């Protein structure tokens, strides 16, 4: 089972999805239509990314009339901004590099 | 993990490595190999030896070898000096190798942080965006 940190990493590892999230952080609440402008992908693709972000708790949606407004939930980043979680991530990444190196090394 | 008595914290990462301890030990203790997976360094496998780890972000970690038991244990200090105490850090990193049928069980522990060190070099200097960018590559390879 994935823990909260894994879910966040996987969710934000996609550059398009991360860009959408960063834009919501930067510019505040937006509709799918507004987010599609400049996203470089279709509106259905943006909607799909927003769905994934929502599932990870990174965005919240608020229906307003015929539109749905999306906003970033910064507190969902807590597992990443937590020092211990971050250092665990640091070592996990370094050990990935270590394993890559071991594969390349002579016996 | 938090040690309530001393206020220190520790991070533990464990991994099954499909290579024997001898090979892993070389990667952990030979400077040119350490540079490939960790950071640039002037490490020497001698207790009491002071060395530096230079990060890509320009920061330098001051280290001193505390314990060496070939192919079993390696421990060194991992200190980051900074005028702002929120960024400064004193810690100890310990690598423990245990041979297994399939290779080696590697345990990495970093211990000794004070609870007020919320912003340490890993995230604050490299930034979590950069971290995630690196992670992206790792995940791409892992799939």
Image (cartoon, coloured by chain):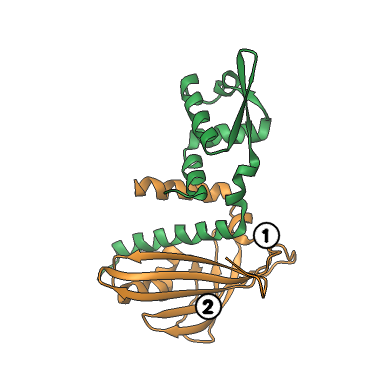
Chain colours: A green, B orange
Residue B92 percent coordinates (x, y): 56, 75
- Of the two numbered discs 1 and 2 in the rendering, the one whose residue sits closer to the viewer: 1
Residue A9 percent coordinates (x, y): 49, 46
In the depicted structure, whether residue A13 falls above or below residue B82: above
| Left or right of B38, for residue A21 | right
**Chain where mark 2 sits:** B
Disc 2 residue crowd, few under 14, some 14–19, many 20+, Cα 10 Å:
many
**Chain where mark 1 sits:** B
Tell me which corner region of the image, top left, top right, bottom left or bottom right, holds residue B102: bottom left
Residue B91 percent coordinates (x, y): 60, 73
> CA separation, marks 1 and 2?
22 Å
Q: Which residue is mark 2?
A: B76
Q: Secondary structure at mark 1?
A: loop
Q: Which residue is mark 1?
A: B118
Question: What residue do we see at 50% from left, 29% from top?
Answer: A51
Question: What residue do we see at 66% from left, 34% from top?
Answer: A26
Disc 1 residue crowd, few under 14, some 14–19, many 20+, Cα 10 Å:
some
């Amino acid at each position: 089972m994935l823990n909260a940190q894994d879910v966040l990493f996987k969710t934000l590892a996609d550059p398009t999805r991360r860009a959408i999230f960063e834009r919501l952080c930067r510019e505040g609440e937006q509709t799918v239509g507004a987010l599609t402008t400049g996203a470089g992908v279709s509106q259905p693709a943006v909607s799909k990314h927003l769905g994934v972000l929502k599932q990870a708790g990174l965005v919240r949606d608020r229906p307003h009339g015929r539109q749905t407004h999306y906003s970033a939930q910064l507190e969902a980043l807590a597992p990443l901004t937590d020092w211990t979680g971050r250092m665990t991530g640091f070592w996990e990444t370094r050990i990935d590099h270590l394993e890559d190196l071991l594969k390349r090394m002579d016996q | 993990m938090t040690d309530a008595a001393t206020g220190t914290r520790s991070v533990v990462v464990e991994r099954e490595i499909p290579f024997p301890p001898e090979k892993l030990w070389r990667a952990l203790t030979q400077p040119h190999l350490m540079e490939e997976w960790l950071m640039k360094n002037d490490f020497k496998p001698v207790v009491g030896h002071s060395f530096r780890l230079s990060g890509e972000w320009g920061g330098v970690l001051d280290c001193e070898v505390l314990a060496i038991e070939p192919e079993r244990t390696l421990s060194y200090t991992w200190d980051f000096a900074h005028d702002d105490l929120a960024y400064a850090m004193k810690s100890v990193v310990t690598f423990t190798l245990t041979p297994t049928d399939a290779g080696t069980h590697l345990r990495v522990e970093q211990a000794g942080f004070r609870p007020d060190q919320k912003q340490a070099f890993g995230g604050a200097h490299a930034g979590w965006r950069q971290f995630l960018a690196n992670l992206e590559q790792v995940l791409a390879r892992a799939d």
